Structures are given as structure tokens and as C-alpha cells.
Image: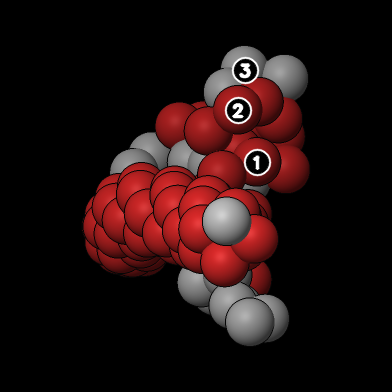
């Protein structure tokens, strides 16, 4: 009779371990799927950043062709403040990635 009690106790313990392992596998699969999504988003962010940088590099080259009053220089700060800031950032170069 004691052997049966011990066997049932071991069986219950094994079932708990199996359930814990199954839960761990489910969590692992979920996290891994989310990580893949985040990695995909990061690649898209990097591509988008590069496209924006390239666009502002092109605008910088075209800026010299504009009449003086329309150029994105320090005097245009009040008129085109956001564009001016982005333009100045583009002159500095692409963002470095410290990973």
C-alpha cells in the first residue's frame, strides 16, 4: 500500500513537471514570435531612417539651386523650423547605432 502511495506521489510530481515544461515551451514560443516581430520592425525603422537621410541629402544638394531667400539656412529657422532642424541633422550624417 505504501508503494502505491509513493508511486502516486511520484506520478503527481512528474505531471507537475510536465505541465511546467509545457508552459515554458508555450511562453518560449510566444516570446520568440514577439522577438521576430520586433526584429522586423527594427529593420524597417533602419530602412526608413536611411530613406529619410537620403532624402535630406538630396534636398541639401538642391538647396544651392534655390533663390537665396528660399534656402534652408539659419535665417529660415523661423519660417521652416521643423524642416530646418531635420536639414541640419541630415548634414551631421546618419545616426550611429550603438548596439
- Pointer 1 local density, CA inside 10 Å: few below 14, some 14–19, many at least 20: few
- Cα distance in 3D space between marks 1 and 3: 12 Å
Residue located 63% across and 82% down the image? 99
Circle 1 residue: 85
Seen in the picture, residue 80 relative to 16 is either above or below; the reply is above
- Image quadrant in which you'd find residue 84: top right
Contact? badges 1 and 3 (CB < 8 Å): no
Q: From the viewer's perspective, is the residue at label 1 or at label 3 nearer?
A: 1
Task: Please state if 7 lies on the left or on the right of 18 as rendered.
Answer: right
Per the model, the C-alpha gap separating discs 2 and 1 is 5 Å
Residue 29 appears anywhere in the view: yes
Q: Residues within 10 Å of mark 2 (few under 14, many from 20)?
A: few
Residue depicted at x 71% and y 30%:
77
User: 20 or 69, which is in the foreground?
Assistant: 20
Disc 2 designates what residue? 82
Asked if residue 73 is positioned above or below residue 2 in the image, the reply reads above
Label drawn at residue 79: 3
69 sits left or right of 5 in the view: left
Amino acid at each position: 500500500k505504501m508503494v502505491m502511495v509513493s508511486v502516486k506521489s511520484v506520478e503527481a510530481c512528474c505531471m507537475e513537471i510536465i505541465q511546467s515544461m509545457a508552459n515554458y515551451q508555450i511562453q518560449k514560443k510566444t516570446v520568440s514570435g514577439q522577438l521576430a516581430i520586433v526584429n522586423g520592425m527594427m529593420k524597417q525603422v533602419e530602412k526608413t531612417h536611411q530613406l529619410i537621410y537620403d532624402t535630406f541629402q538630396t534636398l541639401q544638394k538642391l538647396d544651392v539651386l534655390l533663390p537665396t531667400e528660399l534656402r534652408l539656412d539659419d535665417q529660415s529657422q523661423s519660417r521652416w523650423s521643423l524642416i530646418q532642424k531635420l536639414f541640419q541633422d541630415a548634414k551631421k550624417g546618419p545616426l550611429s547605432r550603438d548596439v
